[in-house]
Amino acid sequence: MDSSPDAGQPAADIAVVRTSGVHKAYGDAGVLTGLNLEVQRGETITIFGPNGAGKTTLLRVLGSLTKPDRGEVSINGYSLTQQAALARSTIGVVMHSSLLYGDLTARENLRFYGNLFSLSDPEDRIETLAERLNVTHRLDDKVRDLSHGLEKRVSFVRALLHRPRLLLLDEPESGLDQNTLAIFEDLLAEFRAAGGSTVLVTHSLERGLALSDRVAILSGGRIVFDDRSQNVPIEELPEIYRSFTGEVS
Amino acid sequence: MKISLGPVWAVAKKDLLLEVRNREIILSILVFSGLVFIIFNFAIELTTVNRDTVGPGVLWVAFIFAAILGLNRSFIIEKDGNALEGMMLSPIGRDTILAGKTLGNLLFMLTALVVLFPVFTALFNVNVLKPEIIVLAALATIGLATIGTMFAALSVNTRAREIMLPVLFLPMAVPILIAAVEGTAQITQGGSWSEAAEWFQVLGAFDIVFVIGALLTFQFLLED
């Protein structure tokens, strides 16, 4: 399967994400205040929360872009303080910005990232993923010339290039048309079926619930609600969200 | 600290490819230096007596200010699309990223000097196209590219990065600037390798200190 994570790793009993007592503050403002979270292999968790709840900071901490002030984080069994490079080699990230160079073509960008991940077969992998995401015809165009949706698709190719075992997705659906959304949802389902884990941040309660095994609500820098998706009826989710965050979704 | 050459070259090669596309860094160094050369050519009355002593100062001051533009630009392209974070999400270390950026900046600065030296020689009638000066310039540029990249990385996330970089960079670049100007002046006045040896040694020593300092600190410069 094109989007499948690297086979054989990690051991089934190792939590793909494990955070314990994670604190992160910017100045006096505590963004994450003792956050504990575990995500198991093959599990997709959606994190909801109001603006400023710390969702993006959480993803940045998990991606080792931001160092927590306190607390422990391990990804696929690798401690982010001791083995950050190994942890990063198992993570694929899609953020608000594309993380691509506008003046390079999509293919040049992907080759570059392939080199950084020391991929032995970047060309084949690029072609396969690009075909899956229906961007093959624009691979030789500069990223700057691509529409937002196409740029996002190339971002997905970049995130999946090195066969990650964990995907961190920050509102990946924003600005996407229905066609691209359908591709994205199929891809996520394939990734999950192949044992990949996903931490998805979104404001769309309906989509987040439909795509995930678990839903959690982050508020005030902590997980204040966490349950299996099957236990959360969609019609009750807005009220649950309001009761834990004090805000309308 | 563990830096592999493959990813370092991959980062530098990416910068070279972007520069081939945009021609922003080398061109900005060339245009700024060229303009300063022309302004000084009109502003200072150079005679056969003072041109060998004043000229090198003009050359290196123009180059160092122009290099600041290029160094700033080399990190602005990383902020576009947040591509720097894309690199930081890969398994290569922060020190590897900055070593690659340093190599790229070094190549841009050396390329600019290849064009600037003949232009300067023609405008000021001071021959800097001598092997001794070329070696001296290469040594000076290694140090400038190393500390310049360090401070460009530090200042890229600040709001006033255009001001922050020169404020941080220039004081640290002063020893290199002095050695480059004095060494160049000595050689243009007919000095030999041995007569200018002390300036080669000064530059070599600062290069070693700056490169070691950079390798030790690079990994902390990109932390959030």
Image: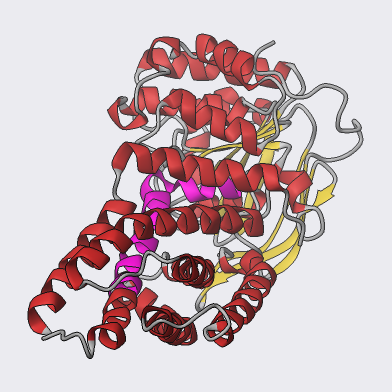
Q: Is residue A12 visible?
A: yes
The answer to whether B184 appears left or right of A231 in the picture is: left
Image position, residue B65 (x, y; %): 30, 73
Q: Is residue A96 visible?
A: no
Residue at the (35%, 21%) spot, across then down? A141
Would you say residue B167 sits in the magenta stretch?
Answer: no
Image position, residue B28 (x, y; %): 26, 57
Task: Read off the magenta span.
Answer: B62-88
The image quadrant of residue A169 is top right
Instruction: From the viewer's side, name the closer residue of B200 and A133.
Output: B200
Secondary structure of the magenta portion, mostly?
helix
Residue at the (50%, 77%) spot, across then down? A27
The answer to whether A44 appears left or right of A101 in the picture is: right
Residue at the (45%, 71%) spot, across then down? B133
User: How many numbered discs, if any?
Assistant: 0
Image height of B214 relative to B80, above or below: below
The answer to whether B54 appears left or right of A11 in the picture is: left
Image position, residue B149 (x, y; %): 49, 65
Figure quadrant of the C terminus of chain A = top left
Please, which residue is most extreme toward the bottom here? B49
The answer to whether A15 appears left or right of A122 in the picture is: right
Instruction: From the viewer's side, name the closer residue of A152 and A68.
Output: A152
Instruction: From the viewer's side, name the closer residue of B10 and B60.
Output: B60
Residue at the (69%, 47%) spot, across then down? B5
Instruction: From the viewer's side, name the closer residue of A175 and B161.
Output: B161
Would you say residue B82 sits in the magenta stretch?
Answer: yes
Image height of A20 relative to A125, above or below: below
